Image (cartoon, rainbow, N blue to C red):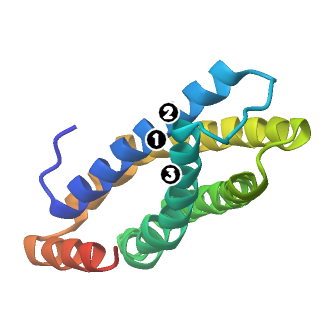
Amino acid sequence: MDYSSQIARLLHDEHMAEIARLECLEGVLQRQGRTHPSIGQDGVLKKLLTDVISSVETQSTHHFAFEEEHLFPRLAAHGEPDIGRFLAGEHEAIREVGSAVAGLAKTAQQDGFTEETWREFQRLGLELIERTIFHIQKEEMGFLPMIEQLLDGDEDSQLALAYAEGR
Protein backbone atom coordinates (compact mmCIF):
# COMPACT_ATOMS: atom_id res chain seq x y z
CA MET A 1 0.00 0.00 0.00
CA ASP A 2 1.20 3.49 -0.80
CA TYR A 3 0.63 5.96 1.98
CA SER A 4 0.96 9.68 1.48
CA SER A 5 1.56 10.57 5.12
CA GLN A 6 4.96 10.14 6.73
CA ILE A 7 3.64 8.53 9.90
CA ALA A 8 1.53 6.01 7.99
CA ARG A 9 4.57 5.08 5.87
CA LEU A 10 6.74 4.66 8.98
CA LEU A 11 4.17 2.43 10.66
CA HIS A 12 3.59 0.49 7.43
CA ASP A 13 7.33 -0.12 7.01
CA GLU A 14 7.54 -1.39 10.58
CA HIS A 15 4.55 -3.64 9.96
CA MET A 16 6.25 -5.17 6.91
CA ALA A 17 9.50 -5.71 8.84
CA GLU A 18 7.56 -7.33 11.68
CA ILE A 19 5.78 -9.67 9.28
CA ALA A 20 9.16 -10.70 7.83
CA ARG A 21 10.48 -11.47 11.35
CA LEU A 22 7.35 -13.43 12.19
CA GLU A 23 7.60 -15.43 8.96
CA CYS A 24 11.18 -16.33 9.88
CA LEU A 25 10.05 -17.42 13.35
CA GLU A 26 7.21 -19.45 11.88
CA GLY A 27 9.60 -21.18 9.48
CA VAL A 28 11.91 -22.21 12.32
CA LEU A 29 9.02 -23.38 14.48
CA GLN A 30 7.60 -25.49 11.67
CA ARG A 31 10.91 -26.93 10.46
CA GLN A 32 12.01 -27.90 13.94
CA GLY A 33 8.79 -29.67 14.81
CA ARG A 34 8.44 -31.21 18.25
CA THR A 35 12.12 -31.96 18.78
CA HIS A 36 13.67 -29.19 20.80
CA PRO A 37 16.65 -27.57 19.10
CA SER A 38 20.19 -27.36 20.39
CA ILE A 39 21.18 -23.72 20.44
CA GLY A 40 24.92 -24.33 20.96
CA GLN A 41 26.39 -23.72 17.51
CA ASP A 42 23.19 -22.73 15.70
CA GLY A 43 23.86 -19.10 14.75
CA VAL A 44 20.52 -18.82 12.95
CA LEU A 45 18.61 -19.84 16.08
CA LYS A 46 20.70 -17.57 18.30
CA LYS A 47 19.98 -14.62 16.01
CA LEU A 48 16.29 -15.53 15.83
CA LEU A 49 16.01 -15.55 19.63
CA THR A 50 17.74 -12.17 19.82
CA ASP A 51 15.44 -10.79 17.10
CA VAL A 52 12.33 -12.12 18.84
CA ILE A 53 13.31 -10.51 22.14
CA SER A 54 14.16 -7.19 20.48
CA SER A 55 11.02 -7.20 18.37
CA VAL A 56 8.71 -7.86 21.31
CA GLU A 57 10.35 -5.14 23.38
CA THR A 58 10.32 -2.57 20.56
CA GLN A 59 6.77 -3.35 19.58
CA SER A 60 5.50 -2.99 23.14
CA THR A 61 7.48 0.00 24.31
CA HIS A 62 7.62 1.99 21.11
CA HIS A 63 5.21 1.03 18.32
CA PHE A 64 2.15 0.21 20.43
CA ALA A 65 2.83 2.94 22.95
CA PHE A 66 3.13 5.55 20.21
CA GLU A 67 -0.17 4.55 18.64
CA GLU A 68 -1.91 4.52 22.01
CA GLU A 69 -0.49 7.84 23.13
CA HIS A 70 -0.54 9.84 19.89
CA LEU A 71 -2.86 8.28 17.34
CA PHE A 72 -5.76 6.63 19.16
CA PRO A 73 -6.64 9.90 20.94
CA ARG A 74 -6.81 11.61 17.53
CA LEU A 75 -9.28 8.98 16.35
CA ALA A 76 -11.35 9.51 19.49
CA ALA A 77 -11.32 13.29 18.97
CA HIS A 78 -12.73 12.68 15.49
CA GLY A 79 -15.57 10.51 16.78
CA GLU A 80 -13.93 7.06 16.49
CA PRO A 81 -13.03 6.07 20.07
CA ASP A 82 -14.02 2.43 19.64
CA ILE A 83 -11.34 1.73 17.05
CA GLY A 84 -8.57 2.87 19.37
CA ARG A 85 -10.02 0.91 22.29
CA PHE A 86 -10.30 -2.23 20.16
CA LEU A 87 -6.75 -1.95 18.82
CA ALA A 88 -5.40 -1.15 22.30
CA GLY A 89 -7.07 -4.33 23.56
CA GLU A 90 -5.29 -6.28 20.86
CA HIS A 91 -2.03 -4.57 21.83
CA GLU A 92 -2.48 -5.79 25.38
CA ALA A 93 -3.09 -9.39 24.26
CA ILE A 94 -0.04 -9.25 21.98
CA ARG A 95 2.08 -7.75 24.77
CA GLU A 96 1.07 -10.56 27.10
CA VAL A 97 1.91 -13.42 24.74
CA GLY A 98 4.97 -11.55 23.43
CA SER A 99 6.31 -11.13 26.93
CA ALA A 100 5.97 -14.85 27.55
CA VAL A 101 7.71 -15.68 24.24
CA ALA A 102 10.53 -13.21 24.98
CA GLY A 103 10.93 -14.66 28.47
CA LEU A 104 11.27 -18.17 27.06
CA ALA A 105 13.73 -16.89 24.44
CA LYS A 106 15.88 -15.22 27.11
CA THR A 107 15.93 -18.40 29.18
CA ALA A 108 16.81 -20.44 26.10
CA GLN A 109 19.71 -18.13 25.32
CA GLN A 110 21.11 -18.92 28.76
CA ASP A 111 20.14 -22.55 29.28
CA GLY A 112 18.90 -23.87 25.94
CA PHE A 113 15.49 -25.45 25.41
CA THR A 114 14.08 -28.48 27.17
CA GLU A 115 11.32 -30.47 25.52
CA GLU A 116 8.81 -28.69 27.72
CA THR A 117 10.13 -25.14 27.16
CA TRP A 118 10.42 -25.78 23.41
CA ARG A 119 6.80 -26.93 23.20
CA GLU A 120 5.72 -23.84 25.14
CA PHE A 121 7.89 -21.55 22.98
CA GLN A 122 6.43 -23.17 19.88
CA ARG A 123 2.83 -22.87 21.09
CA LEU A 124 3.16 -19.27 22.24
CA GLY A 125 5.29 -18.31 19.23
CA LEU A 126 2.56 -19.50 16.87
CA GLU A 127 -0.03 -17.61 18.91
CA LEU A 128 2.11 -14.46 18.76
CA ILE A 129 2.45 -14.82 14.99
CA GLU A 130 -1.28 -15.25 14.50
CA ARG A 131 -2.33 -12.41 16.80
CA THR A 132 0.24 -9.98 15.43
CA ILE A 133 -0.40 -10.65 11.74
CA PHE A 134 -4.17 -10.31 12.16
CA HIS A 135 -3.59 -7.10 14.09
CA ILE A 136 -1.32 -5.70 11.39
CA GLN A 137 -3.88 -6.56 8.73
CA LYS A 138 -6.55 -4.59 10.61
CA GLU A 139 -4.26 -1.61 10.99
CA GLU A 140 -3.22 -1.71 7.34
CA MET A 141 -6.78 -1.98 6.04
CA GLY A 142 -8.53 0.47 8.37
CA PHE A 143 -6.44 2.30 10.91
CA LEU A 144 -3.63 3.70 8.74
CA PRO A 145 -5.99 4.93 6.00
CA MET A 146 -8.08 6.68 8.68
CA ILE A 147 -5.00 8.32 10.18
CA GLU A 148 -4.01 9.62 6.75
CA GLN A 149 -7.37 11.32 6.40
CA LEU A 150 -7.21 12.93 9.84
CA LEU A 151 -3.75 14.49 9.74
CA ASP A 152 -2.69 17.69 8.05
CA GLY A 153 0.86 18.06 6.75
CA ASP A 154 2.28 19.82 9.83
CA GLU A 155 0.74 17.37 12.27
CA ASP A 156 1.97 14.45 10.15
CA SER A 157 5.52 15.84 10.13
CA GLN A 158 5.50 16.40 13.89
CA LEU A 159 4.24 12.88 14.54
CA ALA A 160 6.80 11.34 12.17
CA LEU A 161 9.59 13.22 13.89
CA ALA A 162 8.35 12.22 17.35
CA TYR A 163 8.10 8.61 16.25
CA ALA A 164 11.60 8.58 14.77
CA GLU A 165 13.08 10.27 17.85
CA GLY A 166 11.47 7.69 20.11
CA ARG A 167 13.32 4.79 18.49
Instruction: Please provide percent x and percent y for residue 72.
Output: 43, 70
Q: Which of the two residues, 72 or 91, is positioned nearer the viewer here?
A: 91
Circle 3/circle 2 CB separation < 8 Å: yes
Which label was assigned to residue 24?
2
Residue 51: which numbered mark, if any? Answer: 3
Q: Is residue 10 left or right of residue 95?
A: left
Residue 158 image offset from top left, x and y in percent? 18, 80
Q: Secondary structure at mark 2?
A: helix
Amino acid type, mark 1: Arg
As rendered, which of 92 and 57 lies closer to the eye? 57
Q: Residue at x 60, y 28 (%)?
A: 28
Image position of 85 with respect to 74: above or below? above
Of mark 3 and mark 1, the one earlier in the sequence is 1
Q: Are marks 1 and 2 in contact (CB under 8 Å)?
A: yes
Q: Is residue 151 above or below residue 42?
A: below
> From the image, which quarter does the N terminus lie in?
top left
